[in-house]
Amino acid sequence: MPSLHHMPHEPRPQRIRLGTRDIEARGLAGSFWSDLYYRSMTVTWPAFFASAAAIFGVLNGAFAVIYFLGDRPIANAVPDRFLDLLYFSIETLATVGYGDMHPQTDYGHLIATVEIFTGMSFLAVMTGLVFARFSRPRARFIFAQNPIVSRHEGRPTLMIRVANARHNTISGATARLWLIRGEQSAEGQYFRRYHELRRQRQENPVFALSWTIFHVIDESSPLHGTRPEDLAQAEALLVLTISGLDDSSTQQLNARKNYSQGEIRWGHRYVDISSSADDGRLLLDYRKFHHVTPEES
């Protein structure tokens, strides 16, 4: 039996959420610093700026302590007054330099040189991260809260409604729909299998308003003969991805929506959001976008 100090460190479990299902992953090595760029890109704006402010404060405090350890390294600073050294550190790290205080010893010049280099590097990293966050393309697609299964043109059909909230033009929009469910192989092993569901129309040349994705549940469909309780037992999940070229920014947009099996409304239809105004204009009422109604017998 190995001694306690030789036992390997167990990585902290990671929690993953797919639809409404929580998954815990164990044994994956990783740390906060190994994925710092990813965390910087995905954290919220308030947390991003709060972290930057905290790092800025820690750096200035650390350099102020280093200045304090020297023998009066800063001119015009009150002796043994830590706050003066902290203010000087802030001016130096930000490369402002008001001129009231300045290094007067070799020790002070050396520390100030290191701090200026640190401040320039910190500013460059912050500028790059802010630019990367602002320039990242973001789609404003609205996905219906519930997929529906009802008859369309005389056949049972799975439908999901999507809309472009910006109402700008998305050229060559493409939709892909997947069914993920647990299945057992012939040897009795459990697998999560991915079935791409065929769409009646998988491309939209000009996606500007709304778009309904249709999957006919026929003999070739993985959903053929499937009941809601079958999907619940298999812990099924629907994944819809939409991609296209934003004509305004000439950037590729991608969006994804996951639906659990419990969110599928069987025997329902979407409420029509379109109508005509008195002057002949087309009206779109997005207040009804997520509304469904029972299918007539």
Image (cartoon, rainbow, N blue to C red):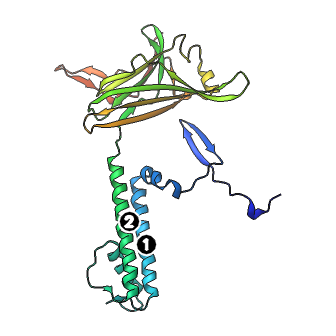
Which one is earlier in the sequence, the residue at label 1 or at label 2?
1
Q: Which mark is residue 122?
A: 2
Q: Residue at x 38, y 26 (%)?
A: 174
Q: Residue at x 33, y 23 (%)?
A: 204
239 up-or-down from 72: above or below: above
Residue 109: give x, y in percent of width and height.
36, 83
Q: Is residue 106 visible?
A: yes
Asked if disc 1 and disc 2 are in contact, CB closer than 8 Å, the reply is yes
Residue 71: give x, y in percent of width and height.
42, 92
User: What is the quadrant of residue 121 in the picture?
Assistant: bottom left
58 up-or-down from 182: above or below: below
Quarter of the figure that contains the N terminus: bottom right
Left or right position of 260 against 82: right
Residue 261: give x, y in percent of width and height.
55, 27
Badge 1 local density, few (<14 within 10 Å), some, or many (20+)?
some
Q: Which residue is mark 1?
A: 59
Amino acid bearing label 1: Leu
Left or right position of 92 against 188: left
Task: Tell us which disc is closer to us: 1 or 2.
Answer: 2
Q: Nearer the viewer, residue 27 or 146?
A: 27
Q: Is residue 270 visible?
A: no
Q: Residue at x 74, y 62 (%)?
A: 6
Q: Residue at x 74, y 64 (%)?
A: 5
Helix, strand or loop at label 2? It is helix
Helix, strand or loop at label 1? It is helix
Amino acid bearing label 2: Phe
